[in-house]
């Protein structure tokens, strides 16, 4: 009967969700804390009212309740963080395993196709070229994933290496736009750009800034609707350079805005739209820009698209 | 083959699709391809396949929803073979409960193994 009562209050569901026992489950602990608080209040009242004045009784009960609530909420918050870390770990393993397995399977099957072309009359170079290209693409996908994950680990441990040199951000924007023409054509998305500052000198790691543009411009194209467009702007604002990229694609629901730059976070809209990616692109983007003295922010509404901005100080 | 049997492949990864299509065509099967869940449901109706290979992680609609909709449509008797990297027990059970004939984990199966499974299920 107690089990049914707990089930009705969704405790069992929450425990299963976190992979925890009942006495480690934050919701259940909160209920227990409530019961203990009430019992303490009643007990203190009866004891104090026999031996102390009314005023002292009220004060004692109030102080005890306040202390129990403060300590209790700290404990529960701590337990919740442990539970969240536990889920993240499990989801991380699941996401990474799946994302790694897909390109590995692609390499295996495409190699099998080439191997079966053993008859020289059927061994057409142009046909084999298609499967070799598939293998190359899968290999590059895997490499990028592993490289990005390693970079995240280095940044977390404070061991990432950043070059410091002055370069023209406008040149890098133009190169990135050229680099994305293929993907944009495939997705039937038009790239429009307005570069109002050239040269736009900044100090930082040019190679890592490419990763920032890969993520921001790449995301804008990937989440745009077919036939749509993205708008890229680069302009000066006081002593800063502001870059922005706007798309009119799937957008990010408001309730998920606070998590966008977290590791391994992918919005529900995102997962419905594309299935690749492990959710570390924006985390890396923010870390790289922060190191260069910059900031990143965004505006977005579900179904209406997003604008991602970043600012960097102008180098002397 | 006079009347080649048709296999519908519902898989969003194009590099996997092209390998599957090539091998199935070489075995004498006709193929149709869908790259997301919505397209998969639509083509299950319009292409009249003899068998469906279905991935579970798809854009727009996942494999479980696609399987559910196919089993609720006139094409409900088309054998559906799951082809995925999600090996967890509850995914396997869920897919079989929804009416999938078999569950294959991509990393464990070669193309030759998949073709054997297809032949097994088409002859039933």
Image (cartoon, rainbow, N blue to C red):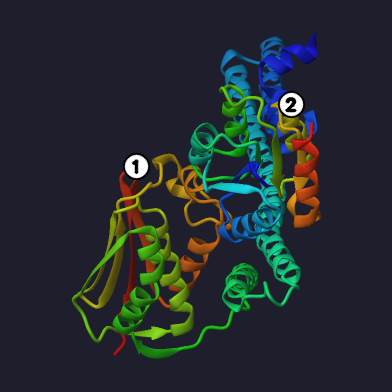
Viewer-nearest residue: A15 or A79: A15
Tell me residue B106's x, y (percent): 74, 52
Q: Give the secondary structure at mark 1.
A: loop
Compared to A52, does A18 lie above or below?
below
Say which residue label 1 marks: A303
Residue A48 visible in the picture: no
- The answer to whether A28 is drawn above or below residue A104 in the figure is above
SS at circle 2? helix
Are there few (<14), some (14-19), or many (20+) residues within 10 Å of tag 2?
few
- The location of residue A76, given as percent across then percent down, is 67, 37
* Residues behind callouts 2 and 1 on a single chain: no
| Mark number displayed over residue A239 | none
Left or right side of A185 for A89:
right
- The residue drawn where x is 66% and y is 58% is A102
- Quarter of the image that includes the C terminus of chain A: bottom left
Vertically, is B20 above or below B51? below
The residue under the point 41% across, 42% down is A253
- Determine whether A276 is above or below A113 in the image: above
**Alpha carbon of mark 2 to alpha carbon of mark 1: how far?**
34 Å
Chain where mark 1 sits: A
Q: Quadrant of residue A221?
A: bottom left
Residues A219 and A88: in front is A219
Please name the residue that numbered disc 2 is placed on.
Answer: B97
- Looking at the rendered image, the quarter that the N terminus of chain A falls into is top right
Q: What residue is at 44 percent from the left and 70 percent from the top?
A: A214
Q: Position of residue B34 (x, y in %)?
A: 53, 46
For residue A209, say whether it is visible: yes
Q: Residue A220's image quarter?
A: bottom left
Q: Is B111 in front, or is A216?
A: B111
| x then y, percent, for residue A284 | 52, 67
């Amino acid at each position: 009967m107690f089990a049914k009562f707990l089930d009705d209050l969704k405790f069992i569901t929450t425990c299963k969700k976190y992979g925890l026992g009942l006495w480690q489950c934050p919701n259940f602990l909160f209920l227990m804390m409530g019961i203990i608080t009430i019992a303490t209040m009643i007990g203190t009242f009866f004891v104090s009212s026999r031996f102390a004045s009314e005023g002292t009784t009220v004060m004692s009960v109030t102080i005890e309740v306040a202390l129990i609530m403060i300590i209790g909420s700290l404990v529960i918050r701590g337990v919740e963080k442990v539970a969240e870390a536990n889920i993240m770990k499990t989801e991380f393993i699941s996401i990474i395993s799946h994302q790694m397995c897909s390109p590995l399977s692609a390499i295996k099957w495409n190699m099998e196709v080439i191997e079966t072309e053993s008859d020289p009359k059927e061994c057409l170079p142009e046909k084999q070229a298609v499967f070799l290209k598939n293998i190359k693409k899968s290999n590059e996908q895997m490499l990028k994933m592993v490289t990005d994950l390693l970079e995240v680990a280095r940044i977390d441990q404070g061991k990432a290496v950043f070059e410091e040199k002055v370069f023209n951000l406008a040149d890098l924007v133009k190169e990135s736009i050229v680099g994305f023409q293929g993907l944009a054509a495939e997705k039937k998305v038009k790239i429009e750009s307005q570069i109002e500052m050239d040269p736009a000198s900044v100090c930082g790691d040019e190679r890592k800034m490419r990763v920032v543009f890969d993520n921001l411009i790449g995301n804008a194209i990937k989440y745009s609707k077919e036939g749509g467009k993205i708008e890229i702007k680069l302009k000066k604002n006081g002593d800063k350079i502001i870059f922005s990229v706007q798309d009119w694609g799937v957008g990010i629901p408001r309730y998920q805005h606070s998590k966008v730059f977290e590791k391994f976070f992918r919005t529900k809209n995102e997962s419905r739209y594309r299935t690749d990616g492990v959710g570390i692109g924006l985390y890396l983007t923010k870390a790289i820009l922060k190191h260069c003295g910059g900031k990143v922010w965004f505006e977005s509404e579900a179904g209406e698209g997003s604008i991602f901005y970043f600012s960097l100080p102008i180098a002397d | 083959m006079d009347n080649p049997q048709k296999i519908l492949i519902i898989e969003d990864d194009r590099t996997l699709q092209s390998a599957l299509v090539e091998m199935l065509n070489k075995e004498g099967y006709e193929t149709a391809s869908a790259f997301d869940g919505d397209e998969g449901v639509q083509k299950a109706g319009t292409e009249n396949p003899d068998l469906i290979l279905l991935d579970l992680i798809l854009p727009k609609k996942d494999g479980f929803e696609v399987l559910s909709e196919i089993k609720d449509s006139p094409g409900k008797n088309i054998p559906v073979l799951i082809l995925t990297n999600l090996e967890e027990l509850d995914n396997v059970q869920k897919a079989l409960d929804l009416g999938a004939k078999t569950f294959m984990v991509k990393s464990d199966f070669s193309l030759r193994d998949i073709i054997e499974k297809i032949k097994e299920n088409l002859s039933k």
